[in-house]
């Protein structure tokens, strides 16, 4: 009934558990006895649970005496759960993190420095992304890129050329307009209106989100306004409006699955979900305006600095991120891309069908837009830009007003 | 603490009227040991509720007070900052906004749920066929999970495909954007909340109605009072203790509105339905400001306490105990 008290109860509970966690934590010792390590993840949620279980099984077979206990959470709840577990001292031995949060977790001392036995196994740039002062604090578990999916049948029906590497925003816009048939419920294009799309379209227009020194924003420029207009202008013309459901979970992918969406900007993690659709589809590198820029997302696993079994936990973290078993399972399932250095290992990935143009995944790596990262206020910054862009999308503000407001609010946030 | 707990804050009618009972003079024969035994017995009876109260209410409140004096992101060690968090909250325009939105919610919700609950109680106080079944039906939402209710209402109020707008379109009305429109987000939450809590208010008022002495109505009828007159001059005054209870509980709960906001709008669009507790949640779990969130919890507690004390003082003017 009393939520203040409930909130307070939660905080006190956290405190109590934190204290309890500290009190019961013995000095780290290695033993040859059987150990059970816990692994908390979101990466397998939504269709890859069995693939993860197969990796766990292979690891346990190779490492008798170590048992891995897996907890899988939806991505949307994972961050809150992880924070609460960290505060309470109940965090798993090994847990997933995202690139955008790595810096904050590392700085707060929750990640154990890792002794990586085979650093050469990893793609150097990915391993480097999770290193601080020369030491690895997390291991990349996968990477994925965002590309443009298209319904080839709809393109054929409209007599349009398929998207190709040379496309720009203008080509995409023209195709989207030709494909949109509101009476039939068919839409030409879908691109979310969010922070994650905005920093990318900025890069596609030769602009950047943060100024070079990282203490203020740099998007309120003519080029930045053009990029925002490209993003929000689809709504109501070639993309459904918020009132029509745009922005609700799975709205865009369901529309694509129903064969009612011409083009869809989303990640290669959707390959599996689209494998059995009754129409032809393929992918292309996202068109840019002045530059080619694609979003690359990378997940990683960290070992808790408070773990009692750092050694066993590190073993599991390495197996999960660099073993041949993992590479085979991920490639076979189309479960993002393994973070390994060995290009040969990825050859089988290219040979697979659905989609045929898998080369686009690697081509998209030629121009990468990395998310802007700030030390304090990352989530708030992302919320502010997302909120202001949606105001512009809904027509409650002009794009200029929304960006000016976002600039003022984020600069105030970054100034502390 | 269930919302169905009898209202402890309602002063007992006899206690209010009669002078404080004089403590009986201690009997010389009663030994010290007997008094200790008596105290221990009292304590034993209190413990089952005192232990959870201390563990899950008082302890956490004290902990929150301690956290409110620190800068804490849940992960790094706490840093003592004194009353900085309170000062920051008072200087932040967002604090005023979330309180304003919360008050806006209460202003919309309270009349709706009270009048609706009163009408239901009056209707179901008559001898209707299947009266118990109707009472059960109207009470059902009260015991339904807020998350389920919120999802159902999001469907009903879906601007493009929802039943409500479809029905409005059928009669030629262009339905609003409900939770996608900043102006309608809070009304959407108010409607869903009033619907869910209607049964609770109904039950309390029904109990109040049934405790009214029927002789009063008979006497009024003899004096020629019509139905409206009986409602205004007998029912409402005699119902005032129940009304008082409903208002106090609804205000306390209203200031802490969260579940429906979190599940229906998340505080959006554009922060239009951001309420105090949602802000506490965001500060803690999204923005890494648990200290500020704890300070805000205490500010909310102070506001609720002040409002409740004001009501208890103010009740003398309008609450009639039989």
Image (spheres, coloured by chain):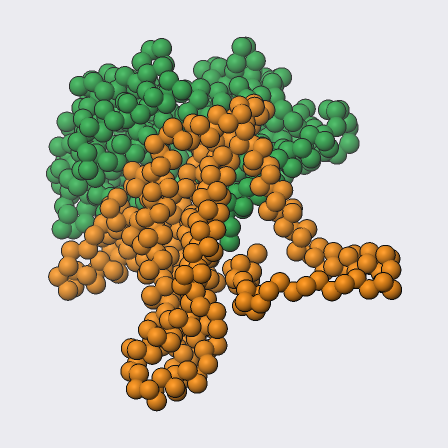
> Along the horizontal axis of the image, is A140 left or right of B232?
right
Image location of residue B266, percent across then percent down: 37, 43
Q: Quadrant of residue B238?
A: bottom left
Rendered hue of chain B is orange
Q: Is residue A9 above or below residue A27?
A: below
The residue lying at 32 percent from left, 34 percent from top is: A266
The residue lying at 40 percent from left, 63 percent from top is: B318
Image mark count: 0
Kindly tell me whether residue A27 is visible in this rendering: yes
The residue lying at 13 percent from left, 61 percent from top is: B172
Image location of residue B22, percent across then percent down: 68, 63
Rendered hue of chain A is green
- Quadrant of image for the N terminus of chain B: bottom right
Image location of residue B66, percent across then percent down: 58, 32
- Which sits in the foreground, A47 or B284? B284
Kindly tell me whether residue B76 is visible in this rendering: no
Q: Quadrant of residue A109?
A: top right
Q: Is residue A9 above or below residue B11?
A: above
- Which sits in the foreground, A296 or B147? B147
Image location of residue B94, percent across then percent down: 35, 34
> Along the horizontal axis of the image, is B319 left or right of B4?
left
Q: Is residue B200 above or below residue A118?
A: below
> Along the horizontal axis of the image, is A32 left or right of B216?
right
The residue lying at 45 percent from left, 78 percent from top is: B212
- Which sits in the foreground, B155 or A125? B155
């Amino acid at each position: 009934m009393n939520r203040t008290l409930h909130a307070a109860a939660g905080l006190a509970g956290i405190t109590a558990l934190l204290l309890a966690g500290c009190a019961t934590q013995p000095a780290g010792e290695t033993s040859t006895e059987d150990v059970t390590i816990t692994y908390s993840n979101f990466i397998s949620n939504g269709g890859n649970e069995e693939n993860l279980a197969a990796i766990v099984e292979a690891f346990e077979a190779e490492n008798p005496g170590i048992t891995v206990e897996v907890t899988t959470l939806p991505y949307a709840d994972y961050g809150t759960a992880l924070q609460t577990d960290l505060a309470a001292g109940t965090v798993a031995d090994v847990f997933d993190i995202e690139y955008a949060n790595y810096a904050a977790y590392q700085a707060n001392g929750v990640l154990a420095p890792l002794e990586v036995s085979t650093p050469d196994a990893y793609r150097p740039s990915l391993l480097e992304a999770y290193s601080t002062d020369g030491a690895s604090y997390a291991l990349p578990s996968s990477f994925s890129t965002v590309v443009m999916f298209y319904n080839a049948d709809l393109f054929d029906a409209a007599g349009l050329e398929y998207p190709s590497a040379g496309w720009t925003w203008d080509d995409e816009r023209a195709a989207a307009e030709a494909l949109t048939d509101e009476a039939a419920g068919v839409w030409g294009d879908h691109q979310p209106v969010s922070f994650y799309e905005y920093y990318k379209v900025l890069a596609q227009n030769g602009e950047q989100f943060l100024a070079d020194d990282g203490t203020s924003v740099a998007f309120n420029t003519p080029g930045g306004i053009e990029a925002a207009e490209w993003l929000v202008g689809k709504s109501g013309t070639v993309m459904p409006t918020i009132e029509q459901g745009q922005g609700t979970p799975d709205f865009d992918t369901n529309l694509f699955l129903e064969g009612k969406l011409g083009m869809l900007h989303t990640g290669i993690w959707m390959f599996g979900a689209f494998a059995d659709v009754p129409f032809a589809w393929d992918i292309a590198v996202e068109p840019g305006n002045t530059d080619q820029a694609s979003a690359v997302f990378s997940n990683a696993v960290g070992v808790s600095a408070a773990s009692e079994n750092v050694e066993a936990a590190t073993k599991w973290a390495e197996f999960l991120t660099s073993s041949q078993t993992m590479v085979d399972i991920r490639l076979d399932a189309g479960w993002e891309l393994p973070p390994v250095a060995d290009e040969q290992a990825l050859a089988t990935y290219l040979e697979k069908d659905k989609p045929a143009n898998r080369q686009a995944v690697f081509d998209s790596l030629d121009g990468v837009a990395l998310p802007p990262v700030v030390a304090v206020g990352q989530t708030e910054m992302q919320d502010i830009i997302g909120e202001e862009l949606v105001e512009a999308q809904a027509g409650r503000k002009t794009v200029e007003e929304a960006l000016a407001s976002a600039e003022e609010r984020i600069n105030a946030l970054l100034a502390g | 603490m269930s919302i169905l707990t009898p209202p402890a804050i309602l002063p007992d009618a006899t206690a209010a009227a009669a002078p404080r009972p004089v403590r009986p003079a201690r009997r010389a024969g009663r030994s010290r040991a007997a008094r200790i035994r008596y105290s221990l017995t009292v304590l034993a009876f209190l413990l089952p509720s005192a232990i959870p109260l201390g563990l899950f209410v008082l302890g956490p409140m004290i902990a929150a007070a301690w956290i409110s004096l620190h800068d804490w992101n849940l992960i790094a060690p706490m840093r003592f900052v004194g009353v900085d968090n309170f000062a920051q909250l008072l200087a932040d325009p967002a604090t005023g906004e979330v309180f304003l939105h919360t008050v806006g919610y209460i202003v919309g919700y309270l009349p709706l749920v009270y009048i609706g609950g009163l009408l239901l109680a009056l209707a179901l106080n008559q001898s209707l066929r299947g009266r118990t079944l109707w009472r059960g039906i109207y009470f059902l939402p009260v015991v339904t999970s807020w998350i389920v209710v919120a999802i159902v209402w999001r469907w009903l109020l879906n601007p493009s495909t929802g039943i409500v707008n479809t029905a409005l379109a059928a009669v030629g009305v262009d339905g609003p954007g409900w939770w996608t429109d900043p102006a309608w987000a809070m009304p959407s939450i108010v409607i869903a909340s009033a619907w869910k809590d209607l049964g609770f208010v109904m039950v309390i008022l029904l109990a109040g109605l049934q405790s009214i002495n029927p002789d009063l109505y008979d006497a009024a009828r003899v004096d020629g009072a019509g139905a409206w007159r009986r409602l205004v001059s007998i029912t409402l005054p005699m119902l005032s203790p129940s009304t008082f209870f409903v208002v106090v509980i609804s205000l306390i709960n209203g200031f802490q509105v969260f579940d429906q906001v979190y599940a229906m709008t998340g505080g959006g669009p554009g922060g239009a339905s951001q309420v105090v507790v949602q802000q506490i949640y965001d500060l803690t779990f999204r923005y890494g400001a648990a200290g500020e969130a704890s300070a805000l919890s205490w500010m909310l507690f102070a506001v609720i306490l002040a409002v409740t004390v004001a009501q208890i003082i103010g009740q003398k003017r309008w609450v009639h105990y039989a």
